[in-house]
Image: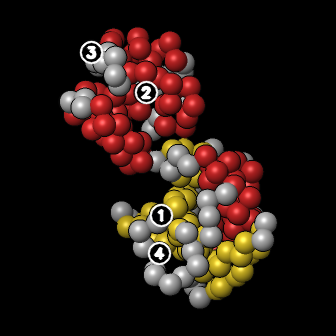
Amino acid sequence: MHVALVSAGGGGQRIIAMPGFVECLCESAVILADGTFLPVPAGLQAYQLLTLHTVSMGQHYHHVVALMENRRQHLYRAVLQKVWELAGNLQPETVVSDYEPALQGALWEVTDAPLQGCYCHFLQALVKRARQKHVPMRLVRLYAMLATIHITSRHCCRRSARMYLEVPVNDAYHPYFRDYWMDRIRPETFSV
């Protein structure tokens, strides 16, 4: 096991890399990055775990875990730069992450690989908003299908929702999808 400490902005992040992580990350065309809060052990001075993992034969392999003190972009960048350095300047074909702006920003700074949003996180966000707005799940499923259609603009979103999926545009839900997913996140990031 390889352990590295990274300091950035007064915070120290601990990076734990599993044996063979360099070969596994370098051989993988897709690297997945995700920050999660639930598994942080009690008593540690850590806000979240940042994991870098790959998928091989249907199994997820967590090669790198970083104990993060907060979710700031400069801390993510410092951790990712150290991992890229230890691995000999990774060149994945794609990096998949959740939609956290600080993590995505750091990934854009560290790698030239295209960044793809995680479809699971996309669905979680759609369902969460639908529950808040009391929107039927059948409508959410139709909006979720928009991620499988190549959509290039905000204007196409409403048209695509009607033409391709016959989605009845919901006044409580559509503005959220349009403003957040189409304008802020952008279709090229959430489309699968």
* Quadrant housing the C terminus: top left
Q: CA distance from mark 1 to mark 2?
A: 24 Å
Write the residue at 55% across / 34% down.
185
Front label number (2 vs 3): 2
Residue holding disc 2: 176
If you read the primary sequence from the N terminus, does the residue marked by circle 3 or circle 4 appear first? 4
If you read the primary sequence from the N terminus, does the residue marked by circle 1 or circle 3 appear first? 1
The kind of residue on which mark 1 rests is: Thr
If you read the primary sequence from the N terminus, does the residue marked by circle 2 or circle 3 appear first? 3
Q: Where on the picture, by quarter, is residue 136?
A: top left
Q: Where on the picture, by quarter, is residue 148?
A: top left
Mark 2 surroundings within 10 Å by alpha-carbon count, few (fewer than 14), some (14 through 19), many (20 or more): some
Task: Between residue 11 and residue 125, name the one nearer to us.
Answer: 11
The answer to the question of whether label 2 and label 4 lie on touching residues, with beta carbons closer than 8 A, is no
Residue holding disc 1: 36
The kind of residue on which mark 2 rests is: Tyr
Q: Is residue 27 above or below residue 45?
A: above
Residue 83 in the image: x percent, y percent?
69, 70
Answer yes or no: is residue 187 visible.
Answer: no
Q: CA distance from mark 3 to mark 4?
A: 42 Å
Residue 145 in the image: x percent, y percent?
33, 31
Q: Is residue 5 left or right of residue 62?
A: right
Instruction: Please give the label number shown on residue 168.
Output: 3
Instruction: Please give the label number shown on residue 18.
Output: none
Q: Helix, strand or loop at disc 1? A: strand
Residue holding disc 4: 40
Furthest-bottom residue in this view: 1
Q: CA distance from mark 4 to mark 1?
A: 8 Å
Write the residue at 39% across / 42% down.
125
Answer yes or no: is residue 3 visible.
Answer: yes
If you read the primary sequence from the N terminus, does the residue marked by circle 2 or circle 4 appear first? 4
